[in-house]
Image: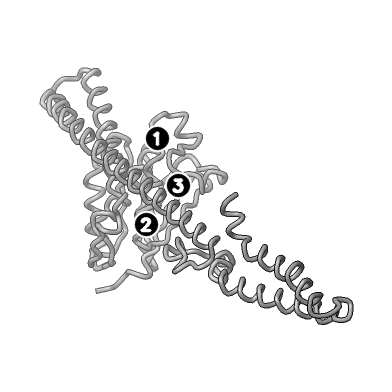
Amino acid sequence: MKLFFRDHLSVIILYCVSFLLLPWIIHSLDDLSAHYLYFIFLVCFLFTVWLIGRYYRRRKLYAHLQKNTLTTDDLHLFEPQAMIEQAYSQKLRQMQYLYLTQQQHLEEQGKEKQLVISHFAHQMKTPLSVIQLIVQSNTNSQSEHLQTIDHECEKLTFTLNQLLTYERTSNLVADLKIEALSLKELTKEVVNDLKDYFIAKEVFPKVMVVENTIIYSDRKWLKVVLYQIINNAIKYSESESSIQIIYDEATLRIKNCGETIPESEILRVFDLFYTGVKGRTSGEATGIGLYLVKKILTVLEHPFTLQSSECITTFSIDFSNSAKKS
């Protein structure tokens, strides 16, 4: 209420001058009826002067409210003059302080969660490695239990690596190092890392990439992408089929034979935690891998597509903006 009266003080003064003081002055000097038009002129003149003064005192507030887009510089009014401007500017500063405080709190929580995830993931990898070494030391044993343990350890290791990769992508841009890479060498390195998985699934890789193919990208993150795509291709391939890795016209295509991805799921498979019908049936999908692929390729500015029809699924990565023949 106090702010209301202070804000409308000029209106009250104008009313008192126009309809109380002016009629009394004109009547005391002469008859008011003889100068009615002069009275109307004075009232209109005072009202116009009041409107002009009110506009110039509040023009910063009007300009601020009419802006379609806001920046951090618009979170306060510069040198507010009118009472309502000062109150509005003070409220904006309070909101800005509250926003920055909450943002800082959320950032601290996010960093704490990342540290906890990273810590526990690394802590879990050590006992997994020990278990795998024990299993491998008993390779002569034909026990189905040992084979099951080894298989489950591999799945846990893969999931933990995905978790660590997801945690690291939170600062992906700062971690980039673009350099010239041999695409065939990198592809063969990923295939070699997955050789045990190829053998277990009875799937065979066919790498058709020219030796002197050079692209410009980040080696570490591109390897993560290729590992995830080829791993998925192996997982969903038919037994005794092949995975073709072809580079042609500045595009890398990874093809596998297996169950077709429904058209309704093509775009959704890149969403976080979306596993699709096949993933829910098998229970092995995490819904993280293709999300990471999309996130990394988007930052690396490598366009990609996913096509699936007639039991052939093709993942294509366009290197036309970063490819070179040496």
Give whichever of discs 2 and 3 has the lower sequence position.
3
Q: Residue furthest front?
A: 28
Q: How crowded is the residue under tag 1: few (<14 C-alpha within 10 Å), some, or many (20+)?
A: some
Quarter in which the C terminus is drawn: bottom left
| Labels 1 and 2: the sequence-earlier one | 1
Determine whether 23 is above or below 172 in the image.
below
Q: Is residue 57 left or right of residue 27?
A: left
Amino acid carrying mark 1 in the image: Ala
Residue at x-position 26% and y-position 60% = 176
Q: Is residue 223 left or right of residue 35?
A: left
Q: Residue at x 40, y 63 (%)?
A: 318
Could you tell me residue 77's position as x and y percent?
47, 65
Helix, strand or loop under label 3 = helix
274 is higher (above) or lower (below) than 323: above
Could you say which is closer to the camera, residue 208 or residue 56? Answer: 56
Residue 73 in percent (x, y) is at 42, 66
Q: Residues within 10 Å of mark 3 (few under 14, many from 20)?
A: many
Work out whether residue 198 can be spotted.
Answer: no
Q: Identity of the amino acid at label 3?
A: Phe
Kindly state the secondary structure of the residue where label 2 is placed: helix
Name, please, the residue furthest toward the right. 33
> Which mark is on residue 207?
none
Q: Please tell me in which quadrant of the rendered image residue 53 appears.
A: bottom right
Identified by mark 2, the residue type is: Leu
Q: Which residue is mark 2?
A: 297
Q: Secondary structure at mark 1?
A: loop
**Circle 1 residue:** 285
Q: CA distance from mark 2 to mark 3?
A: 12 Å
Q: Kindly identify which residue carries mark 3.
A: 270
